[in-house]
Image (cartoon, rainbow, N blue to C red):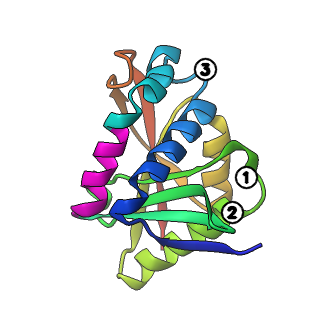
Amino acid sequence: MEIIMRKALPEDAGDYADCVISCWQSAYKGIVPEEYLDGMSENKDQWVRKYEKSLTNHGNCDYYCVTLDGKMIGLFTINKNCDDNFWAIYFLEEFRGKGYGRKAMDFAINKLKRAGDKKICLWVFEENIKAIRFYEKYGFSFDGTTRVVDKYGGVPLVELRYVYTV
C-alpha cells in the first residue's frame, strides 16, 4: 500500500470535490447545519467548478491530494500567509486515526519551514473537538483569537485560531 502526497491538478477537481464533500459531511455532522452538508452533494457540480478554478489559478494556496493505491483518501490546502490563512486538512472517515493526517501535517509543516515561515496558523470550529485534539497533539496552541463565520447555512459558528511556532 503506497501513500502519495502530490499537488492537486485541475483534472483532479471531481475527485477533490467528492473528497471535500464526504469529509465535511462526516467531520462536521452536528456542527455545520445538516441542510448545508446535504446541499453539498446536491450541488456537487458547483464544487467541481470551484475546484477546477482553484486548482488552475491557486494564488497563494497550494492544494494537495493524498492517495493510497491511487484512491484519493484525503487532501490538504496550505497558504503561506498566516494573517489571512486558509488551511484545510481532511481525510475520509475510514482513513482517520491511522497516521495519514500526521504524515500530511509533517509534509505541510516542513514545506512551510523550508519557505522560512516562523508562525503557522489555522482556524478550527470551536465544536470540532477531534480536530482540536489532533492539532494540539501536533503542537499547535490556541492563541486566544476567535471569529464568527455564518457562511455555512447562515448559522453563526465560532472558529478558534491555532498557532504553531517553528
93 sits to left or right of 72: right
Q: Residue 40's spot in the image, x, y percent?
A: 44, 28
What's under tag 1, amino acid-wise?
Answer: Phe
Q: CA distance from mark 2 to mark 3?
A: 24 Å
What's under tag 2, amino acid-wise?
Answer: Tyr
Q: CA distance from mark 1 to mark 2?
A: 7 Å
Q: CA distance from mark 1 to mark 3?
A: 20 Å
Local SS, label 1: helix
Indicate the quadrant containing the N terminus: top left, top right, bottom left or bottom right. Answer: bottom right
What's under tag 3, amino acid-wise?
Answer: Gly
Question: In which quarter of the view is residue 47 placed?
Answer: top left
Residue 20, compared with residue 77, is above or below; it is above
**Which label belongs to residue 95?**
1
Q: Residue at x 67, y 40 (%)?
A: 130
Indicate yes or no whether the magenta region holds residue 50: yes
Q: Residue 83's spot in the image, x, y percent?
A: 27, 55
Disc 3 target residue: 30
Q: Nearer the viewer, residue 118 or 123?
A: 123
Stretch of the chain drawn in magenta: 47-59
**Disc 1 and disc 2 in contact, CB within 8 angstroms:** yes
Mark 1 or 3 closer to N-term?
A: 3
Q: Residue at x 49, y 70 (%)?
A: 108
